Amino acid sequence: MRVDWAVVYRETYADLVRFLHRKVWDPDQAQDLAQETFARALDHDPENPRAFVFTIAANLARDEARAAIRRKKHLTLMAGGAAEAGVAADAPGAAEAQERANAVRQALDQLSERDREVLLLWDAGFDYAEIARQTGLKPGAIGTTLARARRKLVEAHEALAQVAQRPQTKQR
Amino acid sequence: MTHLDEGQLHAYLDGEGTERDGWGRSEIETHLAECSACRARLEDQRRLRDRARAILGTAGPMAVSPPPFDAVLQRAARKRERKLRIPPMTTLAWAASLALAVGVGWYARSLVLEGGGAAAAGVATGATPPQVRADAIQAAPPAARQLAQGTPAREAPARPPQEGIGAVASTATAAVQDRPVANLAAAEAKAPPDTEAPPLRVTEAPVPSPAPAIALRRVQPAVAAPDLAERGWITVPPAEAERRLGGPLATIPGLPSLGTSVFGTGPSAVARTIQVLGPGLTIELVQQRATTAAPERAARERAAAPAAMPQAERAIGDEPGRALTVPWEGFSVTGRALVPDDSLRRLLSRLSRP
């Protein structure tokens, strides 16, 4: 049976963007990668389209992360604060949203690769069986992995919040 | 097992029915009913789970609605189209390197053979053959350049060097020799694919009479340069590019340049400058007269010299990456690089004269 990609697209898009955003940390790029993901998926007829789409997306995000490291080098080459200017141009609430996202990002960075992946898949609405298939872990291990990942995320996030609150004068 | 472990508690909280070690949902519920310690731990874990969910929720993005599915279909169609075309860069880069290798080899060979007489005479006069060969290789790049650019070499009559042109040509040669060959091949790989045939003619044309090797280096560019000026991309120093454009050359200050090539002269001239952003990352700037200034006149001039138009489009169209065109000093400048749009915009906002 052919996959109806238009339906998968409608139902999965928001989750996929959310998932990608937690990997590339750029809303526009997350959307762009989500589009790219579906453009690549169209020719295929997988048994589980949703899992298939997330696999492509995870690969794209990984490639993107590598490219981002290269880009970072050239941005430091350019004089002046390109990064701040970009943020300041957005709406006034954007700076706070950025701040919050940064805190989550830093907390997630402290998780192991596997814990983070499981947590993000769960966050994107996958059930344990799907997470197991996607990551190659045993279905019975997902609960334990998620428990550890959640605890680490909460602890790291709270630690960061305390550091941010205490020295108001000091710059991060 | 006497108590529930964390994994079981989380699976239970997440509504999972996966049976593990003989514990299904109903067994877990039975145990929770009897064991107050496990009930307390369940509530702790519930708080933890909800907190984790809330934290992840603060990372954004706000609810996104998918753009129309047609956008995906179009994107896929574009990708398919691109795949059908043989990647022009790759093919032409190979063709160019091959032509370069053959050209250099052939040139060296013909010099050795031709120079045989000279060398034989040289042995008597004390000139050493290795010197002749070294000079041959030094002189080779302009010839190879011609190949890489796909300029079908005409029968170039060995003319005496003209002073003015000679000066330009030799600076061009210097620019070429400053650059590694690989860069050259990649940067100039815009050639039409008819690059294989000419080597024989090009390399044989400038074979000199047994003249001193130093003269050989001069004669050859002087013959080659006017030819290139008419028919292809030619690498020039910035000052020459400005002369051909009839205006300032757009560059981004602070970034090392891999060189500028131009196509044509006057109002239809197109200049292409490649600058280095970082390891393996370059930005390409394609500059031509903006058409808005005097549309009819520009159109007339374009019609008179139509060759540059497809050249400009090809320079922009073939390469991957994002492209952005900005007006600048009466020109339109298209930047292309594998960077996000906002970075590209910022880079282009820094355009200035060299």
Image: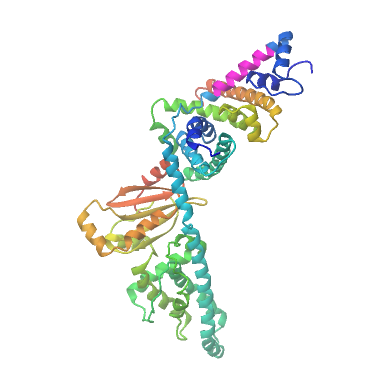
The residue under the point 40% across, 31% down is A88
Decide which of B31, B246 is in the foreground and name it: B31
Which secondary structure is most common in the magenta stretch? helix
Colour scheme of the picture: rainbow
Q: Residue at x 40, y 74 (%)?
A: B153
In the displayed structure, B232 sits above or below A113; it is below
Q: Position of residue B217 (x, y in %)?
A: 45, 76
Decide which of A162, B230 is in the foreground and name it. Answer: B230
Name the quarter where the N terminus of chain B is drawn. Answer: top right
Q: Nearer the viewer, residue B296 or B17?
A: B17
Residue B293 appearing in the image: yes
Residue B51 appears left or right of A11 = right
Q: Residue B44 lies in magenta, yes or no?
A: yes
Q: Could you tell me residue B335's position as x and y percent?
A: 39, 50
| Residue shown at 42% from the left, 76% from the top | B220
Q: Is residue A172 visible?
A: no
- Residue B21 in picture, x, y percent from top left: 76, 23
Quadrant (top left, top right, bottom left, bottom right) of the C terminus of chain B:
bottom left
Residue B120: x and y in percent read: 55, 89
Q: Which residues are magenta?
A: B40-55
Task: Give residue B309's quadrant in the image.
Answer: bottom left
Q: Residue at x 65, y 13 (%)?
A: B43
Residue most extreme to the front? A1
A117, above or below B25, in the image: below
A79 is within the stretch colored magenta: no
